[in-house]
Amino acid sequence: MRLTPTEIAGLTWLDSPVYTDARGAFMVGWRQADLSALAGWRPFVQESLSTSRRGVLRGLHLQHPRPQGKLVRVIAGEVFDVAVDLRPDSPTFLHHVSSPLRADGPALWLPPGLAHGFLVTSEEAIVLYQVTDDWMPEAEHTVRWDDPTLGIDWPLTQPPVLSLRDATAPALSPVLAALGQRGGS
């Protein structure tokens, strides 16, 4: 397994070789020995799976005060994935990384304190999440996906399909205040 850091500290690509033959394919999704070197990694406590159709945008989501580290892997289809650094002591506070994630590509490790979202760019996508803390509805926060402060260039061809929670999410500033942080540019 190859671990490739991004410009956001701790945000890391996990690329595993895929072995194919006449029967199909095989790959190792993750190994504890590899993940234990990653910032913020703790054992996974929950696995979640979402299925979405083209144009669905989920995010930007995070938990506080019990933030989750997340291993995100697309197991069918393709998404445009976004991670936003909301750790106030990070040199990349308020920066984001965005990239396509495909079923035949690497997984992405998000350390605790990053907001996450994705836009489905294929007809359908199945996304698998493994997280380091339990989901707690009372600790969940949502940042508006199109907040101009973040400057995310979503590859939209039409308005996204949003949940009510995502459609009514607050801008970044009130979320940072709720997290006990202050914004910057």
Image (tube, rainbow, N blue to C red):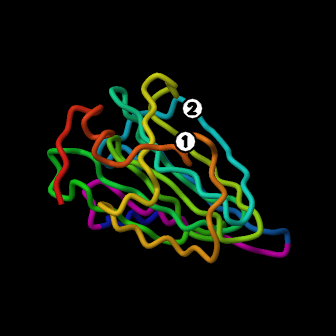
In the rendered image, residue 14 lying in the magenta stretch gets the answer: yes
Please give the residue where the numbered disc 1 appears in the rendered image.
130
User: Residue sitting at 59 percent across and 63 percent down?
Assistant: 119
Compare marks 2 and 1 and give the one earlier in the sequence.
2
Front-lying residue, 59 or 43: 59
Q: Amino acid at mark 2?
A: Gln
Residue 71 position, x and y percent, is 49, 48
Residue 85 position, x and y percent, is 30, 53
The image quadrant that residue 11 belongs to is bottom left
Q: Element under label 1?
A: strand
User: Residue sitting at 46 percent across and 22 percent down?
Assistant: 138
> How many residues crowd around disc 2 within 10 Å: few (fewer than 14), some, or many (20 or more)?
few
Relative side of 36 to 18, left or right: left
> How many residues crowd around disc 1 within 10 Å: few (fewer than 14), some, or many (20 or more)?
some
Identify the disc placed on residue 46: 2
Reply above or below: 159 against 10.
Answer: below
Q: How many marks?
A: 2
In the rendered image, residue 91 lying in the magenta stretch gets the answer: no
- Mark 2 → mark 1, Cα distance in angstroms: 6 Å
Q: Amino acid at mark 1?
A: Gln
Label 2–label 1 contact, CB within 8 A: yes
The image quadrant that residue 148 belongs to is bottom left
Residue 162 position, x and y percent, is 63, 52
Q: Which residues are magenta?
A: 7-22
